[in-house]
């Protein structure tokens, strides 16, 4: 992408404000935060619908309102959620997108079923032992087909080597579009993933399908900062934000600025929203 590194800001996820009061919740807060992030160098903003008190809001109306307000505030590429890990059935998850009058640019498909198993190594305990995220092959296909039919780009959220093998099979069948926009997940807290290390990334990259793939690295439930250099050196982008880590009370835009400063040290620059849109639609 002309040396432009794709920066995706994971703005809020399901995160509370206990560790950082700057997590945006409402559509208005998300739009203002998105504008600040784009000004700092981000191209893509990923958000979850939230209520004014931080509760989850998966309504199509909130999604549409959020995308509209972001579009008024800046030119960010918009990347929604479809009820990740919340136990919603696939029809309800897809309806969040298909029912939205104003649709985002990107929507995710999590490739596979797995435990949601956050482990606190210091306390030697799991934060939950009953979390399961169910994404059967039929669900994956249903969501991907619906996203594409809505004129939105599907993001291949890849939690494991198995996720990437599934992606390869869907590409072989002609049911997943190329070029591929993919999000590679590493985590030190979620044991289902490879650890957030250079070796963990290398193992995932060995199984990327042999097609044109634009990928970003996500360090789920953790900081991206230690993985900036290896991800960029390997040709990837970065997905990070207050949805994953408190970053010592900084705003999302301040974290973007930290990442951009590191990119400049590496002789690189962030990709612009227009560059990302051109790449997604090529």
Image (cartoon, helix red, strand yellow):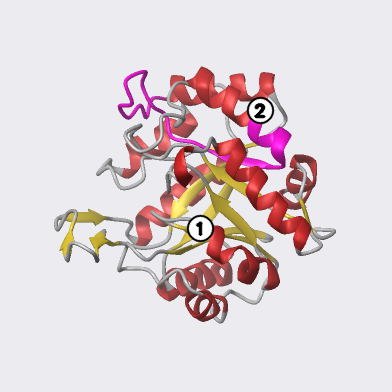
Q: Residue at x 44, y 37 (%)?
A: 12
Q: Residue at x 51, y 75 (%)?
A: 204
Judged from this view, the residue extending furthest toward the right is: 2
Tell me the CA gap for discs 1 and 2. 21 Å
Quarter containing the N terminus: bottom right
| Viewer-proximal residue among 41 and 56 | 41
What SS does tag 2 mark? helix
Question: Which residue is denoted by mark 2 in the rendering?
Answer: 35
Q: Which residues are magenta?
A: 35-59
Residue 154: image x %, image y %? 56, 50
Q: Is residue 222 left or right of residue 232?
A: left
Magenta: main secondary structure equals loop
Residue 194: image x %, image y %? 41, 73
Question: Which residue is denoted by mark 1 in the rendering?
Answer: 218
Say whether residue 67 is visible: no
Q: Is residue 208 above or below residue 1?
A: below
Q: Does 56 appear in magenta? A: yes
Residue 217: image x %, image y %? 55, 61
| Viewer-proximal residue among 252 and 1 | 252
Residue 60: image x %, image y %? 44, 25
Q: Is residue 169 above or below residue 20?
A: below
Instruction: Work out whether mark 1 precedes mark 2 in sequence or the reverse, and give the earlier one.
Output: 2
Q: Residue at x 70, y 38 (%)?
A: 40
| Viewer-proximal residue among 89 and 242 | 242
Q: Write down the quadrant of residue 134 in the picture.
A: bottom left
Q: Residue at x 31, y 62 (%)?
A: 113
Say whether residue 16 is visible: yes
What SS does tag 1 mark? strand
Q: Does 49 appear in magenta? A: yes
């Amino acid at each position: 992408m002309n040396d432009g590194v794709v920066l995706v800001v994971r703005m809020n996820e399901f995160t509370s404000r206990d560790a950082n009061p700057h997590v945006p919740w409402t559509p208005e807060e998300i739009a203002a935060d998105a504008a600040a992030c784009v000004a700092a160098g981000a191209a893509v903003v990923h958000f979850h619908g939230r209520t004014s008190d931080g509760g989850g809001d998966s309504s199509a109306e909130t999604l549409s309102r959020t995308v509209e307000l972001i579009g008024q505030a800046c030119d960010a590429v918009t990347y929604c959620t479809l009820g990740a890990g919340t136990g919603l059935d696939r029809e309800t998850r897809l309806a969040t997108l298909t029912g939205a009058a104003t649709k985002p640019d990107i929507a995710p498909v999590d490739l596979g079923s797995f435990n949601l198993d956050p482990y606190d190594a210091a306390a030697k305990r799991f934060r939950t032992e009953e979390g399961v995220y169910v994404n059967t092959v039929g669900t994956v296909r249903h969501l991907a087909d619906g996203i594409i039919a809505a004129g939105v780009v599907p993001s291949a959220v890849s939690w494991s080597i198995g996720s990437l093998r599934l992606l390869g099979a869907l590409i072989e069948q002609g049911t997943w579009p190329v070029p591929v926009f993919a999000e590679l997940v590493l985590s030190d807290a979620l044991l289902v993933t490879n650890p957030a290390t250079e070796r963990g990334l290398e193992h995932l990259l060995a199984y990327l399908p042999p097609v044109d793939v634009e990928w970003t690295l996500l360090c789920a439930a953790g900081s991206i900062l230690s993985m900036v250099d290896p991800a960029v050196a390997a040709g990837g982008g970065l997905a990070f934000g207050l949805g994953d880590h408190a970053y010592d009370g900084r705003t999302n835009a301040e974290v973007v600025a930290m990442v951009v400063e590191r990119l400049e040290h590496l002789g690189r620059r962030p990709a612009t929203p227009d560059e990302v849109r051109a790449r997604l639609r090529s």
